Image (cartoon, rainbow, N blue to C red):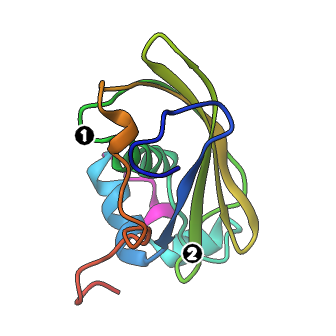
């Protein structure tokens, strides 16, 4: 989809690449007040059968929301986000979020979301977004498709 195009079913949003770091996993869990040890304590996660700490659903939900607002603009409104987790996001992996518009009507769009990592689909679902009038021109430039982290973050 290019700037100025009308939003229509079948449109694909530019992919967003998200490096999965320990900092992102722990910070997301803390920010969402999820103090489960599997999201910040490697030894505890291993004791419970996981090879490492892993991302919580609230962080994933936030990344999905960020993906949509980055594309449609800060004035869009997320009306409904229905996601399901699959393969865990572990530190050192990368998740690539992709979206496809499935419906457009009365100023809203429904977007099918898939976020995949090295193990498979981490997140799948749909989101309903109310679009601002200028949404067709709100998408990011082509070079803004990788989530960046501060230089000192791992």
Horizontal side of 119 relative to 145 (left or right) equals right
Position of 87 with respect to 133 (left or right) is right
Q: Is residue 73 magenta?
A: no
**Label number found at residue 74:** 1
154 relative to 13 in the view: left or right: left
The verdict on residue 35 being magenta is yes
Q: Which residues are magenta?
A: 33-40
Mark 1 or 2: in front is 1
Please name whichever residue, 130 or 55, is drawn nearer the observer in this view of the structure: 130
In x, y percent, where is residue 43?
Answer: 53, 78
- Which residue is labeled 2 in the image? 94
In this picture, is 150 found above or below 68?
below
Mark 2 surroundings within 10 Å by alpha-carbon count, few (fewer than 14), some (14 through 19), many (20 or more): some
From this view, report whether residue 70 is shown above or below residue 134: below
Q: Secondary structure at mark 2?
A: strand
Q: Is residue 116 above or below residue 78?
A: below
* Magenta segment main secondary structure: loop
What residue is at 40 percent from the left and 48 percent from the top? 71
Secondary structure under tag 1 reads: loop
Side of 48 relative to 91 (left or right): right
Q: Position of residue 132 (x, y in %)?
A: 30, 26
Task: Please report the residue visible at 34 percent of the width from the left and 43 percent of the height from the top.
Answer: 137
Q: Residue 55: x percent and y percent? A: 51, 60
Please tell me which of labels 1 and 2 falls first in the chain.
1
Does the image show residue 84?
A: no
> How many numbered discs?
2
């Amino acid at each position: 989809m290019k700037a100025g195009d009308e939003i229509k079913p079948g449109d694909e949003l530019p992919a967003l690449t998200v490096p999965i770091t320990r900092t992102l996993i722990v910070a997301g869990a803390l920010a969402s007040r999820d103090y489960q040890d599997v999201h910040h304590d490697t030894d505890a996660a291993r004791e419970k059968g996981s090879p490492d700490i892993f991302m919580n659903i609230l962080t994933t939900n936030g990344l999905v929301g960020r993906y949509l607002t980055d594309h449609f603009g800060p004035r869009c409104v997320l009306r409904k986000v229905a996601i399901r987790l699959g393969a865990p996001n572990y530190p050192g992996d990368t998740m690539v979020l992709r979206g496809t518009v499935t419906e457009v009507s009365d100023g809203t769009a429904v977007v099918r979301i898939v976020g995949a990592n090295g193990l498979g689909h981490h997140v799948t679902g749909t989101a309903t977004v109310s679009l601002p009038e200028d949404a067709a021109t709100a998408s990011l430039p082509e070079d803004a498709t990788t989530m960046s982290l501060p230089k000192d973050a791992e």
